[in-house]
Structures are given as structure tokens and as C-alpha cells.
Image: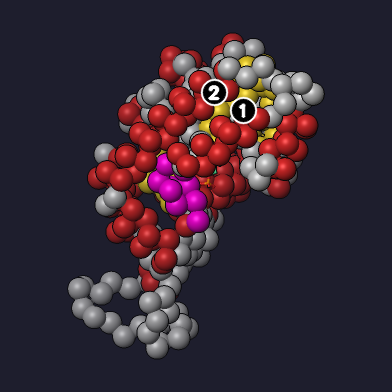
Amino acid sequence: MEVDFTFYLRKSLLELSPYQSAREEFVNYGRQMILLDANENPFATSVNRYPDPMQTRLKKEIASWRKLEEDQIYLSNGSDEFISQIIMGCCEPGEDHILIVPPTFGMYKVAAKIHGVGVKEVPLTSEFQLDVPSILKSADQKTKLLFIPNPNNPTGNSFKAEDIKTIIENFNGLVIVDEAYVEFAKAPSSLPMLNNYPNLMVCQTFSKAQGMAGVRLGMAFAHKTLIAFLNRIKAPYNINSLSLTAASEQLRKQDLVKEQVTTLLKERSRLERVLQELNWVVSCFPSDANFILIRVDNSALRYKQFIQAGIVVRNSSKSLGCENTLRITVGTPKENNTLIEVLQTLDNNL
Ligand SMILES: Cc1ncc(COP(=O)(O)O)c(C=O)c1O
């Protein structure tokens, strides 16, 4: 199928000649070269040289991990940076807009506003599922991107796979399925659909199950034409050397990650059981992620009580449809023991 990718991208950026970094200008033919091209300090520390602008080695490792081609991978300084770059690259400020499905991850709207791009909102249904007919009806020629976090943040649930498929097949712009919590989910990843749907982009991160929020490393997967475009508009050295090395090492520890995920899922069930028994918890929403959203009698009061007990949770009450809710991340078994003690001592009556 021939696809005109230029429809998705900002016309003004199509002709851009990207910054050519010093390290991309020569071929070394396997020889050891003397590097006098990038104004670095030549005395060796482990990081005196600029990192590989195309992150070739790490992409090779991620490609074999995720069963994709290297040219289908874009690496970003956290998924946050990818979100910002894709909005900047696709949406003409003051003209185009993105579509989001609140309650949703807050950065989509913030990034759009920073770039002067409009935001259309199509709320989730009362079961926190995608309102497919309204999403498709709301989209027009200026709707360039749709962001679907799956599992969703802050609600924690996954969306129906058939709804995501229907949307991808019928939406005019790019559909970005943000799989930050995919390792925790029973619901399937959208990655296997990538080769069939050129308007699908999937992003994942090292910040959650991979246990590396501090390295700031996000991965976006898409058709190679979209990835090539993202590479042309990115900052030349957007992933630093320390993060490249740390991520590479983490990829060799996937057995440990799986063990941790299994523990966290068991802990999630344990917390759910306790939460469901508490009178002041109105509802405990089903989660496919490493956090639980609960509706309580009075979120401001309960939030304060948690703080007084030395526990920080997230008050999600400002998100659409999430009045009086708190979002609780699943901690270590020891942290959860303390959390459970606190939960059970909080006063049942206000
Ligand atoms: C759905 C979702 N996407 C993206 C992110 C940000 O990921 P990163 O740490 O890679 O920027 C988060 C963080 O909470 C998230 O919940």
C-alpha cells in the first residue's frame, strides 16, 4: 500500500535540512581515527566524547528485543520528549490540533499548548473506555494526532483491543498508542499491528517496569518514514552516553524485570483486596498497570492523612470524571505493609 506520509507532517518542516553533527560526516572504514572535529576535550573521561547521535548499538539491541527493524525505532529523552517532538513535527501552530481522551496523561495537553497547537477532548465513557463513534466524529482534516495511553493513566485500565483497531483503521491522522505501562498489562500491545498500519505509532518507556525513570529514555516505534522524519527534527545528541550504557545493561536483566513485575502484580492484588474492604473507599477501579485509582469519600482529607502518615499518593481529583479520587502506585512489599497499616487505621468516619 502506497501511503502519502506528507499528509501527517508539517509542510514547513518537510524541506528542512537537518543539522549535520560532526560525527555523521565521515566514514572510518573500521580504522581508529583521531577525533579533532567536534571541539571536545581530548583527555579521556568516560564521557568526554559526544554520544552516537543515532544510538546505533542500543537500537540494534532494542530491535531484537521488540522484534522490529532498527529503522522503526526512535529514542527520546523520556516519552515526554517524543510526545513533544511528534506534536511539533506534525501540527502547524494555530491551525492543527491533537485529540485526547480525558481522563488522560497530562503531558499531551501541556506539550500541545507549549507548541501553540489546539487540543480537542473526547471524554472516555463512564466505564473509562474509548467512545469510538464520538472520537471518529470529532476528527477532521486538522486533527493530526490522537493520543491513547494504554493502559490508561490515571484510571489504570486497558482499552478494548477492538476499539483501538477500529480507531486506527478509521482515523485520518496518526494514532499514538502510549504503552508506558505495557509490561504490567494483560491487554495486548499494539506493536504487532505496526507493520499493517502506517498511521500507528507506539511509544514505550524505560521509566516504569524497566525501573529506570532516572535515565530518561523513551522509545517510539513506527513506520520507517515517520522515524526518519523524527530523526531529522531532533536535537543531534538527544540521548546521553550514560543513559545509553545504562539502558543497554538493563536489557540484559529482563529476567529480573519480569520477577519484579510479577511481585508488583501480586502486591497490586493484595492492595486491591484491602482497599475493597474499607468503608471510606467508594470504589477501587480495576487496574492493568502498576497503580490503583480509588474513589474515596473526601480526597483532600484522605490525601492529607496519607501525608501525615508519611505516604505520598497522587490526588487525581482534577482529572475529568475522577472527582474524589486518589492514585496509588504499588510499592515494594515492605512499603505496602506500611501502606496497609495506614489504610486500616484511617478513620472510617470523617
Ligand atoms: C501514559 C504515560 N506516558 C508517558 C509517561 C512519561 O514517560 P517518561 O518518563 O518516559 O517521560 C508517563 C509517566 O507517568 C505516563 O503515565
The residue under the point 67% across, 17% down is: 279
Type of amino acid at the residue the image marks with label 2: Val
Q: Position of residue 122 (x, y in %)?
A: 66, 21
Q: Secondary structure at mark 2?
A: helix
> What residue lies at 73% left-to-right and 31% top-to-bottom?
302
107 to 280, vertically: above or below: below
- Reply yes or no: does residue 79 show up in magenta: no
Image x and y of residue 88, in percent: 61, 46
Q: Which quadrant would residue 9 be assigned to in this image? A: top right
What residue is shown with label 2?
A: 274
User: In the picture, which quadrant includes the N terminus?
Assistant: top left
Question: What is the chief secondary structure element of the magenta stretch?
Answer: loop
Write down the region rendered in magenta.
Answer: 206-214
The amino acid type of the residue labelled 1 equals: Gln
Residue that numbered label 1 is attached to: 344
Indicate which disc, 2 or 1, sits on the residue closer to the N terminus. 2
**Can you tell which mark lies on residue 196?**
none
